[in-house]
């Protein structure tokens, strides 16, 4: 599924999904790192809930809280971690975490 065509959840749904053991990827249109993450994950990316920070101000604020005031994406969040995904090594960490996470509905 192309990143731009992924359904975007709202922040309340994202927080509940994290609490239930799921994983969330915060992203925005036009972000090359977001597109690279989506491509590298393939179908595994379907296990995450994807939240477009340009469509949800609460989600943008949450990402800024995690990233020292910056709306840096992609930001990956589980109950154990929250970090910006910019390198192949970080993309591999996301893939591993998604295999263990509760799938998105």
Image (cartoon, grey):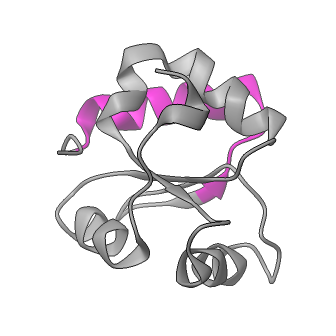
Can residue 89 be seen here? The reply is no
Left or right: 82 as drawn, with respect to 30? left
Question: Which contiguous range is marked in magenta?
Answer: 83-101
Q: Residue at x 46, y 37 (%)?
A: 6
Image mark count? 0
User: Looking at the picture, how far across and down is residue 93, in whole percent?
Assistant: 53, 33
Q: Is residue 2 above or below residue 18?
A: above
Name the residue nearer the viewer: 39 or 65: 39
Hey, which quadrant is residue 82 in on the image? bottom right
Tell me the quarter of the image containing the C terminus: top left
Q: Is residue 43 above or below residue 86?
A: above
Left or right: 2 as drawn, with respect to 98? right
Whether the magenta-drawn stretch holds residue 103 is answered as no
Name the residue nearer the viewer: 63 or 96: 63
User: Looking at the picture, how far across and down is residue 16, in whole percent?
Assistant: 24, 72
Hey, which quadrant is residue 10 in on the image? bottom left
Q: Is residue 19 above or below residue 29?
A: below
Can residue 101 be seen here? The reply is yes
Q: Residue at x 71, y 25 (%)?
A: 36
User: Looking at the picture, how far across and down is residue 77, in whole percent?
Assistant: 48, 59
Per the picture, the main secondary structure of the magenta-coloured stretch is helix
Whether the magenta-drawn stretch holds residue 96 is answered as yes
Q: Residue at x 29, y 70 (%)?
A: 13
User: Looking at the picture, how far across and down is residue 91, in whole percent?
Assistant: 62, 29
Q: Residue at x 30, y 35 (%)?
A: 47
């Amino acid at each position: 599924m192309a990143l731009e065509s992924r359904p975007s959840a709202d922040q309340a749904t994202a927080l509940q999904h994290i609490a239930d053991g799921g994983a969330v990827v915060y992203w925005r249109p036009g972000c090359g790192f977001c597109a690279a993450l989506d491509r590298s994950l393939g179908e595994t990316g379907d296990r995450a809930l994807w939240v477009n920070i340009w469509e949800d101000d609460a989600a943008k604020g949450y990402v800024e809280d995690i990233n020292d005031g910056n709306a840096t994406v992609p930001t990956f969040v589980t109950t154990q971690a929250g970090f910006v995904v910019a390198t192949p090594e970080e993309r591999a960490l996301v893939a591993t975490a998604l295999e263990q996470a509760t799938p998105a509905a």
